[in-house]
Image: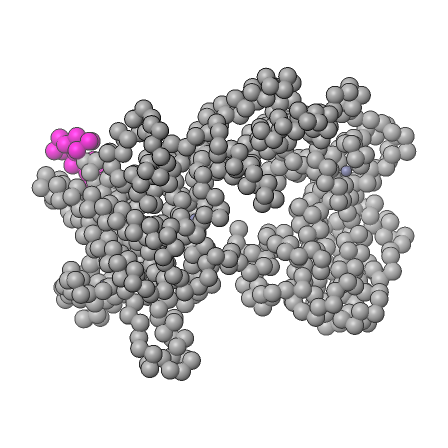
Amino acid sequence: MPPQFAAKRLGKELQKIHNSLPPGIELVSAEDFEEWVLDIKVLDNNPLYKDQTYRLKFKFGGSYPIEPPEVVFVKLPDRPIPIHPHIYSNGIICLDLLGQQGWSPVQNVESVCMSLQSMLTGNTKNERPPGDEEFVRANRLRPKDIDFYYHDNNV
Amino acid sequence: MDSEDDFMSAVSSGDDVHLDDSDNDDMSGADDFDFDDEPDPDLGMPKDIMQKKRVAYDISFKVFQPSDIQKQQDDLINEVNLILDISKEEAAILLRYFRWNKERLIEDYMDKSRQVLDAAGLAHTTTSLPKLEVIPGFVCDICCEDGEGLQSFAIKCGHRYCVDCYRHYLSQKIREEGEAARIQCPADGCSLIIDARSLDLLVTPELTERYHALLNRTYVEDKDNLKWCPAPDCQNAIECGVKKKDLDKVVPTVSCLCSHRFCFGCILSDHQPAPCNLVKRWLKKCADDSETANWISANTKECPKCNSTIEKNGGCNHMTCRKCRHEFCWMCMGPWSEHGTSWYNCNRFEERSGTEARDAQAKSRVSLERYLHYYNRYANHEQSARLDQDIYHKTEKKMVQLQRESGMSWIEVQYLNSASQALQTCRQTLMWTYAFAFYLARNNLTEIFEDNQKDLEMAVEALSEMFEKPVTELADPKLKVVIMDKTSYCSKRRVILLEDTAQNLAEGRWTFNVDLTGSGSNDGPSTTR
Ligand SMILES: [Zn+2]
Ligand SMILES: [Zn+2]
Ligand SMILES: [Zn+2]
Ligand SMILES: [Zn+2]
Ligand SMILES: [Zn+2]
Ligand SMILES: [Zn+2]
């Protein structure tokens, strides 16, 4: 993979993002082609996420978009980690779209944000994934090195 | 999916590949060989009579080397090539598409050849041959390029991307993810498989070798009754008819030509007599409790009599304190003198009376003690196997030296090698008997099991002790006979234990204190890799 491959694509994405972004998605920073930060909001009145803003960190490898980016929620005083049965309290997301099998190179930063928005919109369960506490305590792996079982794709 | 798998395994076990009684047990000695040389063992004899001749834990399997695997594929390809009157190249593509299920391929092809060819990407018209195209106004959705003269490619779904992106995508799939025969279209949600001809067109020369190697692997990976030997650098595959649903009744242990012994059910190293689900559970428990348990497997302990520090440097559990000459057992710290007697139980955990464990705290302490009792012994045999191995290597070096000085031949010192191998195998079995015992609920059979375990353990410790003798003594012909006797006694005890456990497992007579039928895995992420 030529090193400029990811940069070229990300440059085009950035151009488009600067022009316009769907409602509820905001670019916080994109200093280079390795790490971007975005904020997302849930647009409907789902009481679980009402009036909250969540922060997302994207990390891109050299073979993006052939390979998926690494995406996690980041915790800040005014940016909690959204409660969801597929989001661990350390911000790690269990979503097949972000895994090697479910990823398509046609996806992009914007479409990932939108998928996460709709994943939150559709959720009614006020709970963390099973084994959250144990996982958060024990996990030393980066998200891309974890084998998630996408046990239930309708949440 | 399940029904299809069943269908396919039913087909493949019934015809061309026929299982024979390979000898899979390096412990059972030479008498297995003449059995193999018999021209045809089942001369019309009913199947169940044949099987009674085999020991209960012995399952039939066959080892295939790379050339065998290649030949089987070639044979199938040739057969399909003749029957269906298509080229060998096309036959190979169709067979891979049908996951090497020849019967279903032929049946479907006879029925609706056009659809079959179409689905596998082999449509007959020349216009449909895959080719690169330049399309005016085309924008690639992956790299966002729209340059004039940009070459692009699409399979039948019409999802079109530039050639560069397509090649990057394929190289990621082939090189990083090890896929070849079933790579999907890059479009989101499109599950159309990129056909072999398109791949031939797109796969770049530096990837071709890996691509074809992966294609070859699909033959083994697509068949339920074939598995690769997991030993590093081993290219052999094992064929075995044991199915997933049988795994609570049998522990299908196979051994490869490379001498690696492993479980066909879960690919882990030989874990007889414990069934796969029990092993999975035990390993998870040990990993979770590793901090509690770590101090136990330490190499040093204190002499129970004079408190001086004693280091374990051999596999044997019989310890003699250098300072006070006290002899004790490393495992239970009890006096060694009692270990030979029939009433002493080093292997059994004595359940305390219920009154002692009234409150919750005491109960949890007892359950921890119980776990530690078994873990201790499990970990000890694992460690002792390593120490035995170390000592053997040291001994082997000295034997070479001795050989030079005393004129003994290489063959004459091989008994040490056999003894060491027997120790390794027996310790591996012993190790798993403790995981097995941890989950075993008491019934009228557990006592026999514990006696067998104790007998094997005593035999192993006695043999292990031999290795600690100085080399000059080892070379004594009298000691050689003793070691050979002890070696075959160990192997015999192991066979007895395994037969008993396997028989009862097959007949469902063990009861376990946990449910082993479910997978036992909780969903969510698994952090083991
Ligand atoms: Zn492109
Ligand atoms: Zn497609
Ligand atoms: Zn092997
Ligand atoms: Zn197994
Ligand atoms: Zn002492
Ligand atoms: Zn003992």
Give me the residue at 35% from left, 69% from top.
B370
The image quarter containing residue B137 is: top right
Give me the residue at 73% from left, 28% from top.
B115
Q: Main secondary structure of the magenta part?
A: helix
Q: What scheme was used to colour the molecule? A: one colour
Q: How many marks?
A: 0
Up the image or down, B367 lies above or below B142; here it is below
Residue B421 at x, y = what percent? 27, 42
The image quarter containing residue B103 is: top right
Up the image or down, B252 lies above or below B103; here it is below
The image quarter containing residue A104 is: top right
Give me the residue at 82% from left, 26% from top.
B133
Up the image or down, B62 lies above or below B89; here it is below
Q: Is residue B76 visible?
A: yes
Residue B486 at x, y = what percent? 17, 46
Q: Nearer the viewer, residue A126 or A64?
A: A126
Residue B387 in the magenta stretch? The answer is no
- Residue A129 lies left or right of residue B364; in this view the side is right
Q: Nearer the viewer, residue B357 or B393?
A: B357
Residue B480 at x, y = what percent? 13, 41
- Residue B309 lies left or right of residue B3; in this view the side is left
- Residue B447 lies left or right of residue B271; in this view the side is left
Q: Where are the magenta residues, as a range?
A: B394-412
Q: Nearer the viewer, residue A74 or B184?
A: B184
Q: Quadrant of the N terminus of chain B?
A: top right
Q: Nearer the viewer, residue B354 or A31?
A: B354
Q: Is residue B382 visible?
A: no
Residue A155 at x, y = what percent? 71, 60
Give me the residue at 59% from left, 52% from top.
A147
